[in-house]
Image: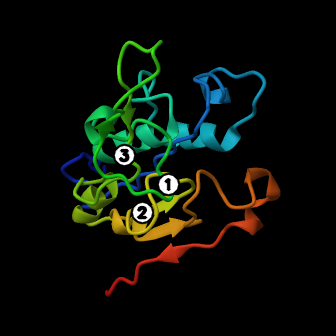
Amino acid sequence: MAAPLTASAAPDRKPNIVFILADDLGWRDTALYGSTYYETPNIDQSATRGMMFRNAYAASPLCSPTRASIMTGLHPARIGITTPSAHLPQVILQQTLQEKGPAIHKALIPNSVTRLKLEYITLGESFKAAGYRTAHFGKWHLGLEPYDPLHQGFDIDMPHTPGPGPSGGYLGGPWKFWQHKEKLVST
């Protein structure tokens, strides 16, 4: 009779980790979480073979602040990225307050940082330090080069576009924007 495989007897192999972040996806927009309208068989199958989180919240209702929070583990206000403005050409690395706001506002609104600073340790960098190969697919929306995924711990970035979405739009088909960049890694 063979001994059962236990955690201590398991081969020393790291698990594959895939994290999916979908903008504007409602909590019940996949079949896995109860949708009777949308069919999501690939997501459903991935969940049955992996882990599901049933009680999680985004740090912000906006894309850039949420992405910055997930990448660093810090609240968007602490990082200073509080609006989806990381695709704009102006580089702002320090959050400031507006000098004057409209008379109807009772508080001054902060001017958002437009790049995820390189000083923050990201998930990509943490996984690389643990011996993983890393890849980012989709919308980064945390800054143009040198603040892009390739400078934040990812070996591959696809489609490596700086804007708030793929060039040509999502409805134009992936063949219009699937270019990618890869760091050269010596083995």
Helix, strand or loop under label 2: helix
The correct choice, above or below, for 152 with respect to 179 in the image is: above
**Taking the image as drawn, is residue 13 in sight?**
no
Could you tell me residue 1's position as x and y percent?
31, 49
- Of residue 96 and residue 23, the one placed in the foreground of this image is 96
Mark toward the viewer: 1 or 3: 3
- Of residue 128 and residue 6, the one placed in the foreground of this image is 128
Q: Are marks 2 and 3 in contact (CB under 8 Å)?
A: no
**First in sequence: mark 2 vs mark 3:** 3
Total marks placed = 3
Could you tell me residue 76's position as x and y percent?
34, 35
Residue at horizontal 50 percent and vertical 28 percent from the top:
61
**First in sequence: mark 1 vs mark 3:** 3
Give the residue type at disc 2.
Pro
Left or right of 13? Residue 176 is: right
The residue singled out by tag 3 in the image is 113
Left or right of 99? Residue 143 is: right
Could you tell me residue 144's position as x and y percent?
46, 63
The residue singled out by tag 1 in the image is 140
Give the residue type at disc 3.
Val
The correct choice, above or below, for 24 with respect to 155 in the image is: above
Give the residue type at disc 1.
Trp
Helix, strand or loop under label 1: loop
The residue singled out by tag 2 in the image is 149
- Of residue 16 and residue 68, the one placed in the foreground of this image is 68
